């Protein structure tokens, strides 16, 4: 059984969708949900779904002892709305085992500060005709690791940032769990 951990900072709709997808799966399961915000809704969702979960602070995340104790034996770390930079020391422990979802078509609209509605507002402001999601490996730079998967949606001239957010949400719900499964099976 492959072991997945999810890092998230806020609501956790992706985390919930991923947990549900792998609930009756024979090859992989979500074993842990972690958040930098101990009050984040994602932790309540994990509790409700029976998945072990915990909050952590910056000091813990940067402490390699804490990380080894809590993250050992994982096959994949999934960042699903995780807003802190994932630390370099952990990337060394999990080479090519950390993936992230970004709510735009990278390399456009990526980088520090580009998250959630900030991304969708920028897309609308720039009158883009399309947006989408990018699932990519995490490296030491924000939103720059190798791209695994992208899916697109149309942006109409009348769309508000909330309209774009809803389209992106649909794409995330549809594709993210499948791409995780595919990434795990390619891993051997
Ligand atoms: C998702 O749309 C995800 O793509 C985005 O945050 C949202 C989290 O929603 N991530 C980023 O913007 C990272 N730069 P959720 O908490 O409901 O899953």
Image (cartoon, rainbow, N blue to C red):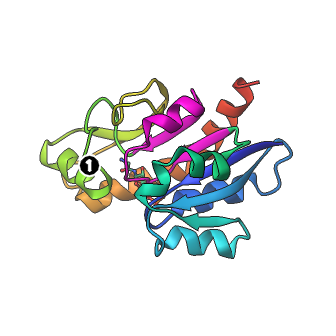
Give the crowd class for mark 1: few <14, some 14-19, many >=20 residues within 10 Å: many
In the picture shown, does residue 74 fall above or below 94? below
Residue at image position (20%, 39%) is: 128
Left or right placement of residue 132 versus residue 45 in this view = left
Give how far across and how far down residue 143 sits, in percent. 36, 35
Q: Is 92 in the magenta? A: yes
Residue drawn at the location 48% of the way across and 47% of the way down: 171
Kindly identify the residue that appears in the image at 24 percent across and 49 percent down: 113
Position of 50 relative to 180 (above/below): below
- Judging by the rendered image, the residue that carries numbered circle 1 is 119
Which quadrant of the rendered structure holds the C terminus?
top right
Classify the position of the N terminus by image quarter: top right
Residue sitting nearer the eye, 62 or 46? 62
Q: In this view, does 170 lie to the left or right of 123?
A: right
**Mark 1 close to ligand 1, CB under 8 Å:** yes
**Residue 106: x, y in percent?**
33, 32
Residue that lies at the very extreme toward the right in this rendered image: 26
- Answer left or right for 50 relative to 55: right
Rendered view: 173 above or below 150: below
Q: Quadrant of ligand 1?
A: bottom left
Q: Quadrant of residue 52?
A: bottom right
Which residue appears at 24% of the width and 38% of the height? 129
Look at the image and say whether residue 121 sits in the magenta stretch. no
Magenta part of the chain = 76-102
> Residue 95's spot in the image, x, y percent?
57, 27
Q: What element carries label 1?
A: helix
Q: Find residue 63 and report its horizontal and vertical position in percent.
A: 50, 48
Q: Is residue 75 above or below residue 79?
A: above
């Amino acid at each position: 059984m492959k072991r997945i951990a999810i890092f998230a900072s806020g609501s956790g709709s992706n985390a919930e969708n991923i947990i549900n997808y792998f609930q009756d799966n024979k090859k992989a399961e979500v074993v842990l949900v972690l958040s930098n915000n101990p009050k984040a809704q994602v932790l309540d969702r994990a509790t409700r779904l029976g998945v072990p979960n915990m909050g952590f602070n910056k000091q813990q995340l940067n402490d390699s002892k804490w990380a080894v104790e809590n993250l050992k034996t994982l096959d994949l770390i999934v960042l699903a709305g995780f807003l802190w930079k994932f630390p370099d020391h952990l990337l060394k422990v999990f080479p090519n085992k950390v993936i992230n979802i970004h709510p735009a078509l990278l390399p456009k609209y990526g980088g520090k500060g580009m998250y959630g509605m900030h991304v969708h507002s920028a897309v609308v402001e720039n009158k883009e005709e399309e947006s989408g999601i990018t699932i990519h490996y995490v490296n030491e730079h924000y939103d720059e690791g190798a791209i695994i998967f992208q899916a697109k949606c149309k942006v109409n001239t009348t769309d508000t940032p909330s309209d774009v957010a809803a389209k992106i949400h649909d794409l995330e719900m549809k594709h993210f769990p499948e791409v995780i499964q595919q990434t795990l099976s390619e891993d051997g």
